[in-house]
Image (tube, grey):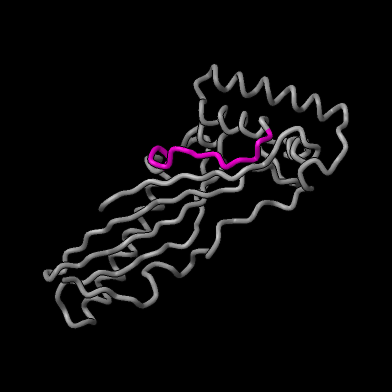
Amino acid sequence: MDQTDLTRPLGRDGGWPEAEAPCANAAYGELPVRAYDLLTLALCHVLGALWALLGLRRAAGALRHYLRRSGTPYRVDAEALLTLPAVRAAADGQLARWRAEALARWRAGPGGPAAYPADSGWRDVLLTREVSTDWWLALRCAEFRLTGTVRVDAAGHTAVDYRFAVQKAWNFDRGKSELGVPFAPFARLHETGLAREFLVTGEAFGHA
């Protein structure tokens, strides 16, 4: 039977204990609706339809969820997200770190098969247009957390079982912009009750 290491999880240093909190926009429906808010709302409906026609289904889906005003969590395909080179590289970097730390503990221990819990903490990776236009428009960045177990056999070979979790507050930060377009008018849709911010979630499992 494997010896289980119950000390601090591998790879925890540098990660955040919690996913990033929502930005400090005004509360849902706190501000009065102005005429230009209705124009912004109409533009967002047009954008959602246009993105869908262009095959940008993830971007269209996220924007439409915002406009539906339910505020319920929105699940994304974490397995597909994990195939993006930037995300895969970030995840693989954490897995490599787990392996290295597990071997260091194993070599310092009594020998024999051993199992080590691992936890990256929450981390983020930027999604650019070059990575994927669809994911860039849908999320702009991804917050992920890897948890799992690294097993080391008697010969020092490693195997990892892991869970890749995504969690992100979907909103428009006041004061920020993209390609010169300010986010404040889009944030006002939440603040005036014409749209509603929500939580993005997703998970995938793997073995390496």
Q: How many marks?
A: 0
Q: Residue at x 27, y 77 (%)?
A: 105
Specify whether residue 75 is painted magenta: yes
Question: Which stretch appears magenta?
Answer: 69-81
In the image, 67: left or right of 163? Answer: right
Q: Position of residue 196 (x, y in %)?
A: 70, 38
Q: Residue at x 69, y 51 (%)?
A: 23
Q: Going by the picture, which residue comes out furthest to the top?
A: 53
Front residue of this view, candidates 179 and 93: 93
Front residue of this view, candidates 181 and 146: 146
Quadrant containing the N terminus is: bottom left
Front residue of this view, candidates 171 and 175: 171
Specify whether residue 82 is painted magenta: no
Front residue of this view, candidates 167 and 39: 167
Q: Residue at x 60, y 19 (%)?
A: 50
Inspect this view and state whether residue 182 appears.
no
Q: Position of residue 84 (x, y in %)?
A: 40, 40
Inspect this view and state whether residue 32 appears.
yes
Asked if residue 61 is positioned above or below residue 162 in the image, the reply reads above
Q: Residue at x 53, y 19 (%)?
A: 54
Residue 179 is drawn in which quadrant?
Answer: top right
